[in-house]
Image (spheres, grey):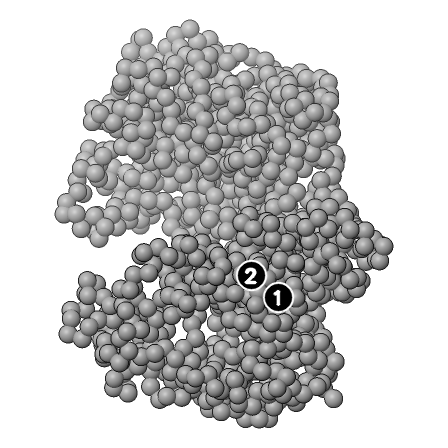
């Protein structure tokens, strides 16, 4: 009997520590893109709350932790870490394999992302649980703040190698700066 | 000459460097200019046009003369200002624009020819013959005149780009900037304080002023330490803010790693600030007197900078020539350091000496001597003329506020009679205020107080409470100045040292009626060098005003544009070399494909295999022919995950598809697939592909690889803007599924060897689709064909893609099949007459490709109305045909044009063009797809293919585009 072997998007590329920054692949488990149909957002949010305990998030916000819901575009959110319930009022699309997701931790995590994304990452502006669809290098993707020195970055699965390239290059440049000075 | 015990880096370690191969020693913290002057090297450069010997003029980023090249080979970096380049051990700098040596420069002949090389000379002289300009004159002129050169090799340095955000950006960390930062930071605002220098303090680092009873530089260091301790303050040293742009965005260039080869060399910042305060200070300006450009003639402020900051006296017997009080302090500082001050010449008749030195009031310098370095000057006053021996002349024509950034959004500065210079115009940059010397406040106390006051205004604008801050005590002397722009006398009076423009050039421009400031600038190249006329523009305007009999305000000024200092393109494009050029999209079979030695080709951002070579194969064509035969006779596997896959769901999904496709999808049965054609709003074909109906209100659309993004964008646009009434949701699932084509007579056998439940023709007819299980994994199966063969596409969640590809190819190889690449895929589809974006290239209609009847008239769709325009229905339009050579060995080439045999192969006789070609191993000759006028009615005709580029002429037979299995029996069977 043949068996198909599952491979994660960043298999063989992570984890990695460069300078103060650690890059780890996140296995998000089940991911479903939920897009409520016209006038259904409230009912969809209620249904999600009652079945998995998290509501449909506001723009640029996440809700819950495990499972969680991450806003990801106009009228769209990703339900992460739980099977999506049957939702009459929404398009539910399996995205479990669509994203390469990397967690960035460390003192220079913000400085690293500042090399790659134009958005304002100051803790006062981009708080824990805030999320943004934005540019990461030349890629479109999502950035979510997980903690004071912790972010989650997601890009299309096929771009995992480029994400690693960009994150690594930026982290190496920051680490090399620490050696400057006389 | 180094003065013992002077300079802020007086106890720094020694640093060894070379200039033009000669080894020197400087101190850590020195700029190259300071270190060279400490070693009595005065002649450091040749001028741009006349190759005149030049020395250091300034002590800052405005330096026009002392440009050097650093590094060799790929690391060669030209036009580095010696006045800002910090020395480091091993630094090897070279002079530029001189051959064979700086001292004996052959091109100095230009200086003797200067009467013939005045402004406008090129325009008048090199006009004819016309063709000579590009081929002869320009290369020769460029060779003769110029700056440093690039190596021509790929840059190997690392650069960085980064973004920063703040409430208040403070540009410049002199007295005003420091007080502004303290004020804003105490109010709780997020502050970025940026300064181009290596240390903060601005002029406090170069003068002998006290602040709050402490030496200026000590006070500055103390304030910097206070600011550094505050969490809401970000200090950016060595960072020049180079441009002001829309929406509070600023560009800045940070020098990072010239001293550390592993760090990025520079970082190009984009800083977004709610408010900004420009505290950029002021730049001293020269006086236009005869031969004012000799090495040893410097700005007075620069002499003080070298003396006080670096402990370097630029001469042994220094003279000073000025029109203001400020410059007299140069004499006081020099005397204090034990340097001889030969004379102070002040053009003001009422000038008073501030100390014990010889003063010539009402005097002017009318001549200078010393080819490679100043030896003497001639001074004229009421008593006549006399010579003074001097090796350094410190000049000062007054100060110009650094208004540059305020002009970056097209505002012009305002003339101030009080300070005889331009000051920023209020509101020039939205949300920017200007403080200190940058707006003409010149005393130290004035700058400190202005920094506080302007920051308080800024803080209030942000809705915060402005703190009360005490102004430190400091000098508050008045700025006394009288106009002095140029001095009468024999010899050239240089204005723009970098572009070799002198006073007479401006007179000539006026004489030739280039009287507007903009015309004068372009006629003379005044201010057009890399220093952007920072030293020369105001004096040049004054000279122009004088020559045209207007005042300076009426004369106006040209504008300043970003960047404030030169920025390497490498810094702006940081990270975009090599793998950073564009995202690389890899399929799940990428590694297995590379393992098989397949050369990759780019398809958009995707990487796809061209072919899978076998050990004995020496050309791509061999591999391609084998793969085509493999699919036709056995079975082939191809990764088609790169095609766009879009999930479309909702109560109105069917109506939505009917609107975006020109054919109908509401009538498609569930578990069936249909080919669809999509038009742009202008009626031309946008894309094609198959769409499967997975449920009553659920479809999955397939796009081409090339147009996946475009189609996704289009669907979003249609659903949001054109048909918001339709309740439908679209989502890309391209990345979710790994999808493989299984094509060939043995396709079903192969699938049945891997599927958990076998499929048969009855339940899985052509154009059917549905769910299947492979080794327990739920996937999707589509019975569709892009090769004309019995074929399927099987999709599994991407995590299983790599594994499934290995499984399918292994099974295929056991059946005499295997993987095939893009070359074979292309041959298979051309044989079958299928189109790609080679054909639907943006200028063809559905009718042009023979699909006119697909545009359903039973419903409306995007592009339908516009596709009915007469020009798009013209029977004379070029339409899709197949071509085959009349002689079986005839060669067909893509891009060739078609002509009636016997007609001249010129554009007037053009009958059409070839879009795709291949050698068909199935048919044993070349095949082509082409667009030919009235093509469908010319099947059987002969037409001549002419490829002017490859010099090919082949007589072809026009035929139906489908060469292989025209009835489609194989795909259905």
Relative image position of residue B151 (x, y in whole percent):
40, 56
Q: Is residue B591 visible?
A: no
Verify CB contact (< 8 Å) between mark 1 and mark 2: yes
Residue B222 falls in image quadrant: top right
Q: Is residue B352 left or right of residue B374?
A: right
Secondary structure found at label 2? helix
Above or below residue B260? Residue B393 is above
Residue at 59% x, 29% y is: B276
Could you tell me which chain the residue with mark 2 belongs to? B
Give the number of the disc on residue B47: none
Q: Could you tell me residue B734's position as x and y percent? A: 60, 66
**Mark 1 burial class by Cα count in 10 Å: few <14, some 14-19, many 20+:** many
Toward the bottom, the furthest residue is: B815
Q: Quadrant of residue B652?
A: bottom right
Relative to B628, residue B897 above or below: above
Q: Pick whichever of labels 1 and 2 is earlier in the sequence.
A: 2
Q: Nearer the viewer, residue B427 or B423?
A: B427
Residue B829, image x, y percentages: 44, 78
Whether residue A53 is situated above or below residue B287 in the rendered picture:
below
Which residue is at the front of the view, B850 or A59? B850
Q: Quick check: B299 above or below B269?
A: above
What residue is drawn where x is 18% and y is 37%?
B124
**Residue that appears at 35% across and 17% down:** B554
Does dot 1 land on a helix, a strand or a loop?
strand
| Mark 2 surroundings within 10 Å by alpha-carbon count, few (fewer than 14), some (14 through 19), many (20 or more) | many
For label 2, the residue is B657
Outermost residue toward the front in this view? B858
Q: Chain of mark 1?
A: B
Q: Nearer the viewer, residue B850 or A69?
A: B850
| Total marks in image | 2
- Distance from disc 1 to disc 2, alpha carbons, whole Å, reads 9 Å
The residue that label 1 is drawn on is B699
């Amino acid at each position: 009997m043949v068996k198909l072997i599952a491979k994660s998007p960043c298999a063989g590329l992570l984890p990695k520590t460069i300078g103060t920054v650690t890059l780890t692949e996140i296995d998000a488990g089940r991911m479903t893109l939920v897009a409520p149909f016209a006038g259904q957002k409230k009912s969809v949010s209620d249904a999600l709350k009652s079945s998995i305990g998290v509501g449909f998030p506001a723009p640029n916000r996440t809700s819950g932790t495990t499972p969680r819901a991450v806003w990801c575009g106009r009228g769209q959110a990703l339900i992460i870490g739980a099977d999506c319930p049957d939702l009459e009022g929404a398009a539910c699309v399996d995205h479990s394999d669509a994203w390469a997701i990397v967690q960035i931790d460390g003192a220079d995590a913000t400085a690293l992302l500042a090399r790659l994304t134009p958005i304002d990452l100051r803790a006062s502006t981009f708080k824990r649980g805030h999320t943004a669809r934005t540019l990461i290098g030349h890629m479109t993707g999502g950035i979510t703040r997980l903690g004071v020195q912790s972010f989650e970055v997601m890009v299309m699965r096929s771009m995992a190698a480029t994400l690693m390239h960009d994150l690594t290059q930026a982290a190496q440049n920051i680490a090399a700066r620490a050696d400057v000075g006389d | 000459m180094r003065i013992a015990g002077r300079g802020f880096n007086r106890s720094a370690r020694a640093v060894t460097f070379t200039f033009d191969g000669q080894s020197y020693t400087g101190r850590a913290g020195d700029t190259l200019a300071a270190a060279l002057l400490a070693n009595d090297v005065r002649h450091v450069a040749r001028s741009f046009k006349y190759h005149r010997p030049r020395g250091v003029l300034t002590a800052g980023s405005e330096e026009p003369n002392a440009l050097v090249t650093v590094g060799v080979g790929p690391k060669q970096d030209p036009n580095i200002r010696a006045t800002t380049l910090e020395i480091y051990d091993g630094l090897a700098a070279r002079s530029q624009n001189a051959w064979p040596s700086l001292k004996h420069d052959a091109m100095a002949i230009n200086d003797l020819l200067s009467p013939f090389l005045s402004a406008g000379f090129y325009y008048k002289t090199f006009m004819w013959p016309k063709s000579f300009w590009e081929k002869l004159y320009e290369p020769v002129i460029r060779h003769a005149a110029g700056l440093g050169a690039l190596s021509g090799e790929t840059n190997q340095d690392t650069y960085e780009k980064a973004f920063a955000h703040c409430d208040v950006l403070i540009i410049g960390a002199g007295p005003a900037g420091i007080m502004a930062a303290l004020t804003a930071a105490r109010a709780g605002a997020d502050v970025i304080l940026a300064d181009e220098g290596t240390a903060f303090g601005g002029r406090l680092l170069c003068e002998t002023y006290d602040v709050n009873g402490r030496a200026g530089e000590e006070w500055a260091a103390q304030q910097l330490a206070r600011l550094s301790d505050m969490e809401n303050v970000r200090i950016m040293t060595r960072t020049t803010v180079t441009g002001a742009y829309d929406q509070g965005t600023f560009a800045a260039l940070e020098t990072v790693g010239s001293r550390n080869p592993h760090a990025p060399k520079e970082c190009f910042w984009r800083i977004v600030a709610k408010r900004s305060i420009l505290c950029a200070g002021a730049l001293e300006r020269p006086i236009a007197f005869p031969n004012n450009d000799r090495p040893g003639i410097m700005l007075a402020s620069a002499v003080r900078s070298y003396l006080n900051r670096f402990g370097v006296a630029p001469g042994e017997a220094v003279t000073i020539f000025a029109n203001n009080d400020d410059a007299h302090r140069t004499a006081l500082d020099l005397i204090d350091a034990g340097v001889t001050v030969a004379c102070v010449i002040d053009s003001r008749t009422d000038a008073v000496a501030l100390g014990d030195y010889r003063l010539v009031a009402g005097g002017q310098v009318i001549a200078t001597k010393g080819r490679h370095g100043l030896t003497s000057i001639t001074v004229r006053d009421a008593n006549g003329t006399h010579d003074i021996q001097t090796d350094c002349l410190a000049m000062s024509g007054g100060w110009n506020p650094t208004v540059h950034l305020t002009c970056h959004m097209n505002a012009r500065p305002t003339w101030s009679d009080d300070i005889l210079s331009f000051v920023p115009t209020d509101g020039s940059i939205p949300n920017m205020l200007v403080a200190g010397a940058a707006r003409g406040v010149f005393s130290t106390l004035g700058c400190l107080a202005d920094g506080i006051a302007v920051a308080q205004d800024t803080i209030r604008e942000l809705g915060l409470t402005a703190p009360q801050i005490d102004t430190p005590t400091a000098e508050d002397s008045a700025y006394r100045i009288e106009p002095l722009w140029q001095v009468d006398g024999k010899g050239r009076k240089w204005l723009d040292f970098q572009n070799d423009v002198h006073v007479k050039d401006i007179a000539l421009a006026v004489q030739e009626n280039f009287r507007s400031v903009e015309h004068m600038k372009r006629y003379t190249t005044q201010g057009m060098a890399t220093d952007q006329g920072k030293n020369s523009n105001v004096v040049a305007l004054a000279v122009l005003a004088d020559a045209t009999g207007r005042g300076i305000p009426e004369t106006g000024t040209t504008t300043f544009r970003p960047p404030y200092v030169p920025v390497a393109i490498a810094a702006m494009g940081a990270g975009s070399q090599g793998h950073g050029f564009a995202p690389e999209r890899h399929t799940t079979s990428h590694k297995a494909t590379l393992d098989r030695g397949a050369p990759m080709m780019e398809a958009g951002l995707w990487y796809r295999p061209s072919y899978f070579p076998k050990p004995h194969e020496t050309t791509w064509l061999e591999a391609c022919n084998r793969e085509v035969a493999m699919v036709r006779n056995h079975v082939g596997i191809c990764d088609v995950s790169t095609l766009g896959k879009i999930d479309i769901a909702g109560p109105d999904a069917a109506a939505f598809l009917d609107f975006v496709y020109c054919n109908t999808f509401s009538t498609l049965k569930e578990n069936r697939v249909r080919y669809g054609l999509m038009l742009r709003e202008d009626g031309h074909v946008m894309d094609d592909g198959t769409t499967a109906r997975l449920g009553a209100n659920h479809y999955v659309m397939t796009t081409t690889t090339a147009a996946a993004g475009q189609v996704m964008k289009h669907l979003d646009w249609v659903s949001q803007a054109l048909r918001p009434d339709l309740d439908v949701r679209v989502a890309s699932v391209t990345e979710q599924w790994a999808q493989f084509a299984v094509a060939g007579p043995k396709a079903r056998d192969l699938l049945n060897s891997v599927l958990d439940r076998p499929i048969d023709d009855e339940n899985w007819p052509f154009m059917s689709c549905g769910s299947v299980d492979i080794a327990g994994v739920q996937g999707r199966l589509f019975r569709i064909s892009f090769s004309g063969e019995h074929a399927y596409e099987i999709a599994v969640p991407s995590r299983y893609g790599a594994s499934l590809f290995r499984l399918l190819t292994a099974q295929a190889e056991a059946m005499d099949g295997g993987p095939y690449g893009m070359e074979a895929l292309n041959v298979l589809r051309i044989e079958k007459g299928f189109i790609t974006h080679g054909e639907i290239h943006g200028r063809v209609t559905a009718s042009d490709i023979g699909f006119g009847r697909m545009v359903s008239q039973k419903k409306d769709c995007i592009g339908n109305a516009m596709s009915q325009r007469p020009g798009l229905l013209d029977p004379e339009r070029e339409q899709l045909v197949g071509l085959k050579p009349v002689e079986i060995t005839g060669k067909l080439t893509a891009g060739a044009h078609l002509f009636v045999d016997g007609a001249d192969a010129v554009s007037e006789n053009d009958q059409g063009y070839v879009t795709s070609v291949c050698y068909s191993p199935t048919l044993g000759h070349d095949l082509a797809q082409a667009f030919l006028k009235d093509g469908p009615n010319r099947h059987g005709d002969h037409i001549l293919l002419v490829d002017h580029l490859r010099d090919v002429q082949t007589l072809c037979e026009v035929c139906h585009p489908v060469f292989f299995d025209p009835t489609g029996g194989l795909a259905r069977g």
